[in-house]
Amino acid sequence: MQRRVFVFILAMLCSASFSAQAQTPPASTPDLRLEAFVSGVWEPGQVYVTLRQPDGRMLIGGRFGRADGGIARSALLRLNRDGSIDTGFAPLLAGLSTVNVYSLAVHGGAIYVGGFFETVNGVTMRSIVRLRMDGSIEPGWNSPFSSAAANQVQSIAVTTSGVYVGGDINEQDRYGLARLATASGALDPAWIAQTQFGVTGTPNGGNRGEVTAMIADADDLIVAGQFGQVAGVARTGIARISQGAPVSVRAFDAQVSGRVDALQASGTQLYIGGNFFRSNPAINYLNRIDAVSGAVDAGWAPNTTGSVDALRLIGDRLYVGGSFTNQPPGGARLLRIATSGNGAIDGTFNPGANNTVLTLADTCRGNLLAGGTFTQMSGLARNAFAAFPVPQIDCIFHGDFEVQ
């Protein structure tokens, strides 16, 4: 089971009124012109994950082999704070077929990279690697996975207790989730939180679930993806579990049906996005819930017309990316929504992506960064990556620390 990237090609806008609505153009820089070499030709690349380092530089992962017309980068690159490509950071990821980077984390001065690959800098390193800030492999680190095809890492959370990885995991008796030793990458034998699609039967490699998003909250993890059970307890799409062993599944229950792919925490609130449905109250694709109980905020009810893949909270505005093609107000595949009131869609922000937005990040200096499978924004060419000036809270950077 590989990570499913849903591609929707925009043949026409949803209505005449939508066509007439002013679109929000992307910033002129950075324009990375990402490309992937497929079947002997260069074609537009794809971006699956973006992450701001504490020093303000931006990590970008996906499926691409070059940027800016010829700068070689294998599925991972880093931007300087001014948006230029970091020429000193060029780890070489390779595979037997396609190389994809799906997940990133920065912790303790190290970069954790997860995805679908076989080697890094010429060393066998399947699906996850710990890098130094210069792109070299951390000495003593080894991937625990015997197969890249059976272990595609789609989410990472690093805490003082270990490196938690989620995805399409099928290694020994780990299905969907595993904990690795921070220094070595070895599987932790004490921490087992098996996921599976159904809610009955014993988890196994054939019915394993997938964990596509994960965040640490206090001593717990909030994990999301496509599953019906975690650690023997029925939970659909999202669950709250302990970081400690043996794994405890908390009472938290969002009562959704389907797949959850995006998480954004804000104090005691949690925004969740995906391809899921609720019956009571009927708020689909995008919800705001209590981070401890999972109870839905019924008064906050934005309406997207399709699945949500990315969330980014900047001040009192929530940016939402996905495959939806909303009628006005709002834009196709990228929206700005008020966190106050009932969650009104901001009709003045309308980037008009021609394909799916899969990841969102912010520079902390006035730019929203969007990545995905699109090739255009507001009719302008942007291969998988675009920036937008947005109202933003400034950050203060000092060394390895960031204060917002």
Image (cartoon, rainbow, N blue to C red):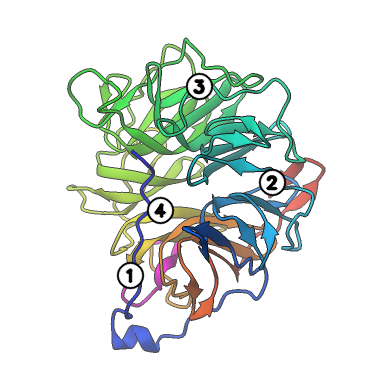
Q: Earlier in the sequence, mark 3 or mark 1?
A: 3
* Residue corresponding to mark 2: 53
Cα distance between the residues tagged 3 and 4: 24 Å
Do residues under tags 4 and 2 come within 8 Å of each other at their CB atoms? no
Badge 3 density bin: few <14, some 14–19, many ≥20, Cα 10 Å: many
Q: Position of residue 280 (x, y in %)?
A: 18, 47
Q: Residue at x 25, y 32 (%)?
A: 197
Residue 232's tag is none
* Residue corresponding to mark 4: 309
Viewer-closest of 213 and 348 = 213
In the displayed structure image, the side of residue 125 where residue 404 appears, left or right: right
- The three-letter code of the residue at mark 2 reads Gln
- The three-letter code of the residue at mark 3 reads Arg
Viewer-closest of 217 and 245 = 245
Picture quadrant of residue 182: top right
Q: Position of residue 219 (x, y in %)?
A: 51, 24
Extent of the magenta region: 326-341
Q: Secondary structure at mark 2?
A: loop
Q: Residue at x 72, y 52 (%)?
A: 57
Cα distance between the residues tagged 4 and 2: 21 Å
Q: Earlier in the sequence, mark 3 or mark 4?
A: 3
- The three-letter code of the residue at mark 1 reads Thr
- The three-letter code of the residue at mark 4 reads Asp
Is 401 above or below relative to 185? Answer: below
* Residue corresponding to mark 3: 179
* Residue corresponding to mark 1: 325
